[in-house]
Image (spheres, rainbow, N blue to C red):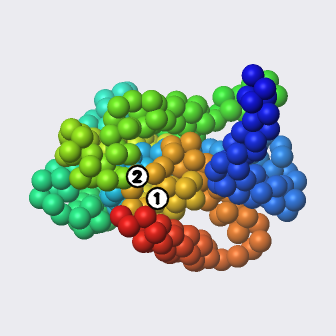
Amino acid sequence: MTEQTLSTPGSARRRLLQINPVYVLLVALLVAIVLLNPAFMEPQGYMNYLKRAAALAILSGGALYVIVAGGFDLSVGAMMTLTVIGSSMLASNDPNSTYWIIPLMLGIGALVGLINGLVVSYLRVPSLIATLGMMITLTGVAFVWSGGAPRGYLPDTFRFFGRFNITGVPLVNIFPVAIICLVVFGLILWWGMHRTNLGRMIHAIGDNQRAARLAGVPVERVRITAFIVSSMSAVVAGVILGGRAGVSVDIGSGYELQAITAAVLGGAQLLGGRGSVPAAMAGALALEAIFTLLNLLGLPQPVRQVVQGLILIGAVALAMYRRKRTGR
């Protein structure tokens, strides 16, 4: 009993030191935003911020499955674009079409993830190349389908998930439906990664694929599942983004790199084996906070790309350094 009592302060100190730095970064960024724009403290300010970040946060949580398994999915941005373009073309101005379009797009997303997983797992094509090819393919399909220009529109029943605000909520007055989607899908992704055998096997594959195979892990099936989760998360993110921003032929462009950057900010190791869904989503919130801060400072749009590039370069350098130290 005495030893436990004496060790409690040290244990608490160790737990404090183990707090993921992304949460500290997020708080610091939000404080900086408030100092520059006190109106951000109003419910409309921070609720709109969360609404903007919802799509990226869901996308990052799904993309983390592939990253932890030791791969990359560069096709998620194009999958978001195809979701928005395809939904607008299929809707035909019919509000009732939403109820079959979203399940159809989820099915297409699952098929795309399955193809990515099969190509990577059985044809031994590096995930970077396989998903880059899929990104080009999906972009071409969306371009041909739309004729190169936005056509049709998303009915209100579709845009509900990304645009609608519940009003009259105590304390905050408005509560975007996009935040509810973020919480629901965030919990699903967290449960799958951190509370199931699937998540443990994904970590095992990313940490040491050979050892995982010798331990009886079905490496190919697990990796395929990771790609399916990633692609279906891109569809959900596309539904939310399309609902908020409307139809555009390049609406998902660049989101694949933003998702990787967010996961890196959350502490995910680009060589696999390490990552947390809540931390990846916090990384997405931090990235959106960085963009908001840059806008408040009046810096041009290309600065976003510079920031993302520096984060990714630093992450790759850190991953290679860790691999050199551990000998893996």
Quick check: 183 left or right of 196?
right
Which residue matches tag 1?
269
Question: Where does label 2 land, which residue?
Answer: 273
Report the amino acid beneath label 2.
Gly
Q: Secondary structure at mark 2?
A: loop
Label 1: how many residues lie within 10 Å, few (<14), some (14-19) or many (20+)?
A: many
Residue nearer the viewer, 183 or 192? 192
- Residue at (71, 57) in percent of width and height: 25
Question: Residue 318, position in %: x, y?
Answer: 51, 70
CB-based contact (under 8 Å), mark 1 and mark 2 = yes
Element type where label 1 sits in the image: loop
Residue drawn at the location 68% of the way across and 32% of the way down: 175
Q: CA distance from mark 1 to mark 2?
A: 7 Å
* Picture coordinates of residue 1, whole percent (x, y): 75, 22
Q: Can you name the residue that lies furthest to the front here?
A: 2
Determine whether, in the image, residue 187 is placed left or right of residue 300.
Answer: left
Q: Amino acid at mark 1?
A: Gln
Regarding residue 245, the answer to whether it shows in the image is: no
Q: Is residue 68 above or below residue 174?
A: below
Relative to 195, does residue 115 appear above or below in the rendering?
below
Residue occupying image coordinates x 23% and y 53%: 210
Q: Is residue 156 above or below residue 311?
A: above
Residue 72, how many percent across, how many down? 35, 59
